[in-house]
Amino acid sequence: MQIQYKTIHLKKRFALAISRGVTNGTDNLFLAITMQDITGFGEMSPGRTEGADSVESAQTALESFTADNDLEALSVDAIHDLALEQQVPACAIAGLDIALWDWLARKNAQPLYQMLGFPRPKVPTSVTVGINPPEVLKERVPLLLEGTGVRSLKLKLGSPEGIEVDQAMYAQVAESARAYGVSLRVDANGGWDVAAAKTMMRWIAERGADYVEQPLEQGAEDGLPELFRDRPLPILIDESCHFVDDANRWAHCVDGVNIKMMKCGGITGALRIIAAAKEHGLKIMVGCMGESSMSIAAAAALTGLADHVDLDSHLNLDPDPSLGTRLLEGVVVPLANPGHGATLKPEYAW
């Protein structure tokens, strides 16, 4: 097994502000794994809560892991489990896992979603609107919607300035989006306590929101049962659900889970959460972090079974270094190539 690494800076078109801070871009780690003259490609977006806050630490962990273990003798599932056992960061495992699944699908000469037995993607993606003053949102919403085919907006709330600011932002987005006929969703990114969450959930439900995501911060899940009892709209968790054990733990007090490959260790971890969500009757969202079309294409392969899709990070890149997806009537569709369908553009390739 030969592995090549490449770090590429992904610059955002619009800075993304959430309850925990502002991001203008990320350095992501890209992998190329070659065996039997076939190369599979993967991507890792670092994150503090995903175990590695830099590409340097993630690459070091992967180089050590791949040097110390005979991975060619193992299945993708076994590699995933061994990496978790040896405490490789989840986001680093994700980059490796995506590349291995891409390799396997290329070897089988099938698009990844077909090899996994999933339907073709059909659920439109949300496009995210970060925390911004109403005057900024008034200008930005038409830029996101005019002529794009976008069907829904996910508004980041949980402003440190309080729920009055959240309400002003939601009201502006609703007004600016009204002419486009799109639906609105809310992601608080853990920015509320139980009292604020109750107030805001009622308020946004009265104004047509589809669901609320991560109303309470990670670590405050003991408040979820209280919110769940009289919820006026569905509750999905994101930061509170990294691995399949988390989905099982909170299944009794949420309506759905947001699956992100950087949290769960790639496609292997995502497949396990999907299975658990189906068993518990939970809604499935497939989401993303700060990723290019490469990782988005891999995630899109899973969306044939999804209820909600939030794969839009590549749409906010200037430029996107990868080729791998199309946006067809709001649906993120992988290119119809063997594997997950994505590669680096020639100017970024190894």
Image (cartoon, rainbow, N blue to C red):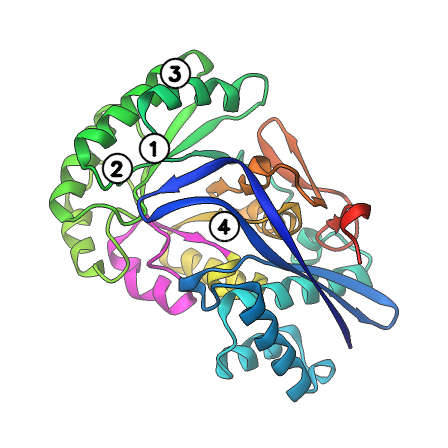
Q: Which mark is residue 81?
A: none
Labels 3 and 2 touching (C-beta < 8 A): no
Q: Which mark is residue 176?
A: 3
Q: For the residues labelled 1 and 4, say whether their Cβ atoms are less than 8 Å apart.
A: no
Task: Identify the element where label 4 is drawn.
Answer: loop
Q: Position of residue 6 (x, y in %)?
A: 70, 61
* Other residues around mark 2 within 10 Å, as few (<14) / some (14–19) / many (≥20): some
**Magenta stretch, residue numbers:** 236-260
What amino acid is labelled 1 in the image?
Asp
In terms of sequence position, does the residue under pointer 3 or pointer 2 come before the other?
A: 3
Mark 1, other Cα within 10 Å: few <14 / some 14–19 / many ≥20: some
Percent of width and height locating residue 226: 14, 51
Q: Badge 4, how many Cα within 10 Å: few under 14, some, many 20+?
A: many
- The residue that appears at 72% across and 60% down in the rendered structure is 41
* Residue 267 appears in the figure: yes
Q: Which residue is mark 4?
A: 289
Q: Could you tell me which residue is drawn at 18 percent across and 37 percent down?
A: 162
User: Would you say residue 257 sits in the magenta stretch?
Assistant: yes
Of residues 224 and 99, which is closer to you in this image? 99
